[in-house]
Image (cartoon, rainbow, N blue to C red):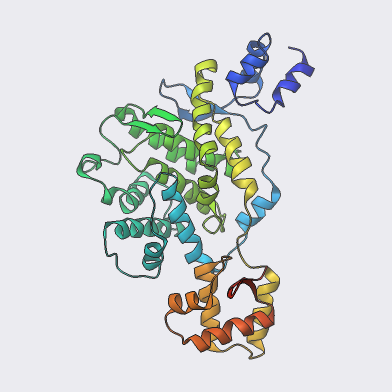
Amino acid sequence: MDIKLFTQMLNDKHFSDYKKMKYKYADDFTDFLKTIEELYYKELPLDDFAGAKIVYMDTHAAISQKSFKLLMQPQNDAYGINAAENEIVATSAIESIDFNRDSVRRILKGMAPKDEQESRILGIKNGLEFIADTSNALSEENLYKLYMTTVGNFLPEEDKLLDSHFYRHDTVYVVSDHIEHSGIDHAKVPVCMKALMDFANNEDDINDLVKAAIIHFYIVYIHPYFDGNGRMARLVHLWFLIQKGYKSALFIPFSSKIEKTRKQYYDAFTAVEENRKISGRIDVTPFIIYFVNNVYNKIDDGTAEVSTLAVYDEAVKNGKITEKESMLWKFVLSYYGLNEFSTKQLEKDFGDAAYATIRGFVLKFEKLGILASTHYGTRVKYKIKR
């Protein structure tokens, strides 16, 4: 095949959509696909439904160095509650499960669930804590624990796993936004999931962030459970990154990025399935490209600037910050992150300070350059200064 034309096709914006490429380059698409199969497909130790190895290409996985840096840097645990709140709300919203944020905040503050919805929120919270503990290595046994903690214990009887079964025992059909999919034959699920855990734990030359996306895709593709496959795929994606030393994986707006690009997320799954009809192979590349363009390269740190934290540390060192003010600052970091809040809201959420104390806190921290205020008519809201 002509190298100039091949390069042009390889760099076409519709490169990963074989149906469009076949239409646009009708006379040359067959040769193009054959060249890709010979030179660019990399086989993975994971089987498709027919028992063939799934493949991927790494030519379009240009992940920014900023993303790697942000994912590797350690975080102040004070940001944890706000990050967990956003993750719980977003990962549920992707599947059209709308949790009340007040309920999420109640559970994250350690309060007991008052209804079924809050019990399910507690399950996801416990799941996040489970994967955050690096002693919980990726294994089928731990995957089962994570599933039961996060999803399995809250399912109706018909969707529950049988005793001593790690995975579903029957057929599952999926109909969702832009996806119509049936999971693999339930008899093959244990073999595929063992292969996936082996793949996750084996050392290879695959970029960690690309590998995490492949693991994510494969869980949804296999559909090892009757329900909760998407939530588990996103959790295991994060779990793998944490195990690989990406300390900030739980602090980035991971599922929020997916929720905001939900259509593209589902379209990426669909593209893999549609491409298979043309190429005969399950090629995960469209899903990897989705993650690179819509999640990884869109990451920002979501935390206060280092200079802001340095100002606070200096004020503490010079005795300008009281113990109560320090508690309020850590609460603001944890509970609001970079979101706005009012003095009345802080008084209600914190629950252990008089309004005068709250008012004095925000005014002092604004003067120090740690908080910034925005006026909305007669109302004033504050947020951490960046």
Please provide percent x and percent y for residue 268.
53, 33
Q: Is residue 171 visible?
A: yes
Q: Is residue 324 visible?
A: no
Spot the residue most to the bottom: 319
Identified at 76% across, 17% down, the residue is: 5
Please provide percent x and percent y for residue 152.
29, 48
Spot the residue most to the right: 4
Q: Based on the displayed image, in which of its 4 quarters is residue 376 positioned?
A: bottom right
**Side of 157 where 187 appears, left or right:** right
**Side of 86 where 15 appears, left or right:** right
Spot the residue most to the front: 377
Please provide percent x and percent y for residue 361.
57, 84
Which one is nearer the viewer's eye here, 324 or 234?
Answer: 324
Quadrant containing the N terminus is: top right
Q: From what the image shows, is residue 73 above or below residue 227?
A: below
Please provide percent x and percent y for residue 347.
47, 79
Q: From what the image shows, is residue 185 above or below residue 226?
A: above
Identified at 48% across, 36% down, the residue is: 217
Identified at 56% across, 65% down, the residue is: 339
Identified at 55% across, 42% down, the residue is: 261
Q: From what the image shows, is residue 293 above or below residue 29?
A: below
Which one is nearer the viewer's eye here, 165 or 305?
Answer: 305
Quadrant containing the C terminus is: bottom right
Which one is nearer the viewer's eye here, 36 or 292?
Answer: 292
Number of callouts in the render? 0
Spot the residue most to the top: 27
